[in-house]
């Protein structure tokens, strides 16, 4: 399982970099452990990117697990109604 730590700031300014990193993870054909415990800012663009990544992982039969989530991250996920899609139920 490969581990990926989300950066502190996940905003539209850095979403291209996040997309590139997640694309590389998806290409590795392995299960992924995501850690969002250091996230202090996140917006809808980054959450959409994460949601697309997790959906693609699921469709490819690969597991994605969360090892930690900051309050900022979980609040944003809840606000946008993405708990189920992100596997945070």
Image: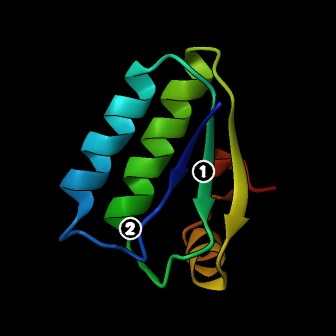
Say which element carries label 1. strand
Determine crowd level at label 1: few under 14, some 14-19, many 20+ residues with C-alpha closer than 10 A.
some
Quarter of the rendering occupied by the N terminus? top right
User: 29 above or below 14?
Assistant: above
Identified at 38% across, 73% down, the residue is 43
According to the image, label 2 marks what residue? 44
Say which element carries label 2. helix
Answer left or right for 15 relative to 82: left
Looking at the rendering, which quadrant does residue 21 occupy?
A: top left
According to the image, label 1 marks what residue? 34
Identified at 37% across, 61% down, the residue is 46
User: 37 above or below 66?
Assistant: below
Dot 1 or dot 2, earlier in sequence:
1
Image mark count:
2
x then y, percent, for residue 41: 42, 82
x then y, percent, for residue 25: 42, 32
Q: Residue furthest right?
A: 89
Using the image as rendered, state which of residue 3 and residue 89 is in the foreground.
3
Determine crowd level at label 2: few under 14, some 14-19, many 20+ residues with C-alpha closer than 10 A.
some
Answer left or right for 83 relative to 72: right
Answer left or right for 72 relative to 14: right
Q: Which of labels 1 and 2 is toward the front?
A: 1
User: 88 above or below 72?
Assistant: above
Looking at the rendering, which quadrant does residue 42 occupy?
A: bottom left
Quarter of the rendering occupied by the C terminus? bottom right
x then y, percent, for residue 44: 38, 67
């Amino acid at each position: 399982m490969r581990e990926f730590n989300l950066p502190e700031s996940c905003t539209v300014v850095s979403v291209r970099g996040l997309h590139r990193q997640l694309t590389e993870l998806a290409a590795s054909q392995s299960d992924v452990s995501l850690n969002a415990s250091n996230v202090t800012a996140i917006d809808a663009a980054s959450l959409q990117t994460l949601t697309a990544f997790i959906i693609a992982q699921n469709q490819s039969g690969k597991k994605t697990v969360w090892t930690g989530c900051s309050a900022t991250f979980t609040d944003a996920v809840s606000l946008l109604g993405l708990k189920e899609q992100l596997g945070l139920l």
